[in-house]
Amino acid sequence: MPCSVGINIGHTILWADQGEGGVTEPMREWYARLPIKASACTECGLCLERCPFGVDILERMRMAVALYETGP
């Protein structure tokens, strides 16, 4: 896993992308079950170095926090 704190980057990005169209209660419940939330991101950049797709993972982590951790 490329995340130094153990965030499941793939699942977190998936749900951040899904949430852009609106977050439902089932989506919030799924996110709540993640053992390590996007807010644990230290922005170390390790994931950016290892990502073969050029995704701005740090921005996606911030988006996940905004969508799922800062309230409706």
Image (cartoon, rainbow, N blue to C red):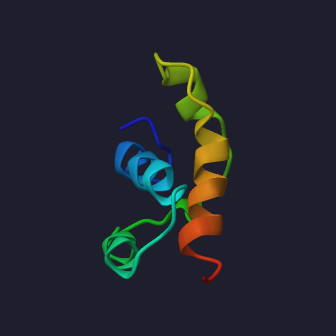
In the image, residue 57 sits, relative to residue 14, either above or below, namely: above
Horizontal relation, residue 67 to residue 37: left or right? right
Q: Position of residue 9 (x, y in %)?
A: 43, 45
* Total numbered circles: 0
Horizontal relation, residue 59 to residue 2: left or right? right
Horizontal relation, residue 64 to residue 8: left or right? right
Q: Quadrant of the C terminus?
A: bottom right
Residue at (53, 33) in percent of width and height: 47
Considering every residue shown, the one lying at the far top of the view is: 52
Q: Position of residue 21 (x, y in %)?
A: 51, 57
Taking depth in this image into account, of 52 and 72 the one nearest to the observer is 72
Q: Is residue 26 in sight in this rendering?
A: yes
Residue at (35, 68) in percent of width and height: 34
Residue at (63, 33) in percent of width and height: 56
In the image, residue 41 sits, relative to residue 69, either above or below, namely: above
Considering every residue shown, the one lying at the far front of the view is: 21
In the image, residue 50 sits, relative to residue 11, either above or below, namely: above
Q: Position of residue 50 (x, y in %)?
A: 49, 22
Taking depth in this image into account, of 54 and 20 the one nearest to the observer is 20
In the image, residue 48 sits, relative to residue 66, either above or below, namely: above
Taking depth in this image into account, of 59 and 18 the one nearest to the observer is 18
Q: Is residue 7 in sight in this rendering?
A: no
Q: Position of residue 52 (x, y in %)?
A: 46, 16
Residue at (56, 60) in percent of width and height: 64
Q: Quadrant of the N terminus?
A: top left
